[in-house]
Image (cartoon, rainbow, N blue to C red):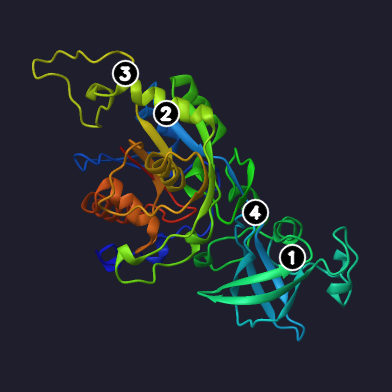
């Protein structure tokens, strides 16, 4: 199976460069993966497409301020993105610009707008000697090993996670070609973000609001959480020609007991009952009689985002509820838990596009993407969403 098979033409003007003015004011395309039927709607109307008894699972990871602006001793500027750390492994960063083993980089504080902070930011002419709450030389990062693909191992007197929290800015995707603003600090984070550790946001969740969650709860949708810290695999392109040759990097995850129980209870209650999984196009009987219940009860497990889908399917495959998740889902994969998926529009040839293709079917998904482009939906992290059910 070739990576090039999962390509499409994405016009530059369809890429959302900024979040919508109001969170949740985005569009929603609903795709029936059995029939290929498409319905155009709005994210705020998501409750119309979910049923009482559905279990909606959210990722409660919190995005680190992981983008660090640094300087070499000769004044050349470099950018680093702090990557997730697993156990006792070395600290790692993605870097922009040439660096070499042994290089020493000094972190420069930056305003949220991306502009350098002025002279009143307590920096002296020698940032290494700056007095700050983290101590002497706390802003110094040493490159210890170049790993390739823009990744390096580093050492620092203070853990990178602490440096990122104090000096970092929002790690916006590179394709936005801009620095983060004050608005990004809030909007590139879910409204329920809790557990610090992601190098990028679970983007389908960025459109969700507390008001919509409340509407879903009122309807009888069961809301549960898990944690997956989005990491290295989100940034790296697939460099092999064959999909099967690509190796996903590990990401830390944890699924709480109450989430596991809710999923298992729903699966057990509705196993073998196809009436619990009504499609978008179901019509009343031909004689005009509508024998559907007034309040349709469903047993679907709905993943809000590909991070949730990967985590749940890794649990289904391994039985593990915590640890390192390196599952790569591409067409041909058989989903064991996820019955519906809420996701954004993904970049061509990306691993997340392949996951969506595995769930919806590539022909269905490509048709939906073509429709979305024609209808001027916004794509990628700050863009519109789709519900595949």
Residue bearing the label numbered 3: 296
Residue appearing at x 75%, y 67% in the figure = 156
> Disc 2 versus disc 4: distance between alpha carbons?
29 Å
Left or right: 7 with respect to 107? Answer: left
Is residue 3 something that shows in the picture?
Answer: yes
CB atoms at circles 3 and 4 under 8 Å apart? no
Viewer-side label of 2, 4: 2
Residue appearing at x 45%, y 35% in the figure = 44
Is residue 212 something that shows in the picture?
Answer: no
Q: Disc 1 on helix, strand or loop?
A: loop
Residue bearing the label numbered 1: 110
Q: Position of residue 238 (x, y in %)?
A: 39, 67
Residue bearing the label numbered 4: 64
Q: Disc 3 on helix, strand or loop?
A: loop
Mark linked to residue 263: 2
Viewer-side label of 3, 4: 4
Return the disc, 3 or 4, that comes first in the chain's sequence: 4
Q: Disc 4 on helix, strand or loop?
A: loop
- Tell me if residue 12 comes above or below residue 29 in the rendering: below
Viewer-side label of 2, 3: 2
């Amino acid at each position: 199976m070739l990576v090039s098979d999962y390509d499409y033409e994405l016009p530059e003007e369809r890429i959302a460069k900024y979040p919508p003015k109001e969170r949740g004011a985005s569009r929603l395309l609903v795709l029936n993966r059995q029939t290929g039927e498409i319905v155009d709607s709005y994210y705020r109307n998501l409750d119309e497409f979910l049923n009482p008894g559905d279990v909606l699972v959210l990722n409660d990871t919190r995005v680190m301020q992981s983008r660090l602006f640094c300087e070499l001793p000769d004044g050349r500027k470099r950018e680093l993105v702090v990557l997730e750390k697993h156990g006792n492994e070395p600290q790692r960063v993605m870097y922009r610009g040439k660096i070499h083993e042994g290089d020493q980089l000094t972190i420069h504080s930056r305003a949220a707008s991306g502009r350098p902070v002025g002279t009143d930011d307590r920096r002296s002419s020698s940032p290494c000697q700056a007095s700050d709450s983290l101590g002497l030389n706390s802003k110094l990062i040493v490159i210890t090993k170049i790993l390739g693909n823009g990744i390096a191992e580093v050492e620092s007197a203070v853990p990178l996670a602490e440096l990122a929290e104090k000096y970092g800015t929002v790690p916006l995707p590179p394709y936005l070609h801009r620095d983060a603003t004050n608005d990004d600090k809030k909007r590139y984070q879910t409204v329920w973000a809790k557990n610090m550790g992601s190098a990028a946001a679970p983007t389908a969740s960025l459109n969700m609001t507390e008001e919509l969650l409340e509407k879903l709860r009122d309807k009888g949708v069961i809301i549960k959480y898990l944690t997956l810290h989005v990491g290295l695999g989100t940034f790296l392109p697939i460099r092999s020609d064959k999909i099967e040759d690509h190796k996903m990097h590990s990401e830390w995850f944890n699924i709480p007991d109450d989430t596991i129980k809710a999923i298992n209870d729903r699966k057990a209650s509705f196993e073998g009952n196809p009436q619990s999984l009504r499609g978008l196009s179901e019509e009343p009987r031909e004689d005009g009689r509508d024998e559907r219940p007034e309040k349709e009860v469903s047993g679907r497990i709905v993943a809000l985002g590909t991070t949730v889908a990967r985590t749940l399917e890794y649990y289904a495959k391994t039985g593990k509820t915590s640890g390192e998740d390196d599952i790569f889902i591409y067409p041909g994969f058989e989903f064991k838990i996820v019955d519906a998926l809420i996701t954004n529009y993904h970049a061509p040839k990306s691993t997340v596009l392949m996951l969506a293709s595995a769930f919806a079917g590539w022909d269905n998904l490509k048709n939906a993407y073509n429709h979305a482009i024609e209808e001027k939906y916004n794509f990628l992290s700050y863009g519109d969403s789709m519900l595949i059910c």
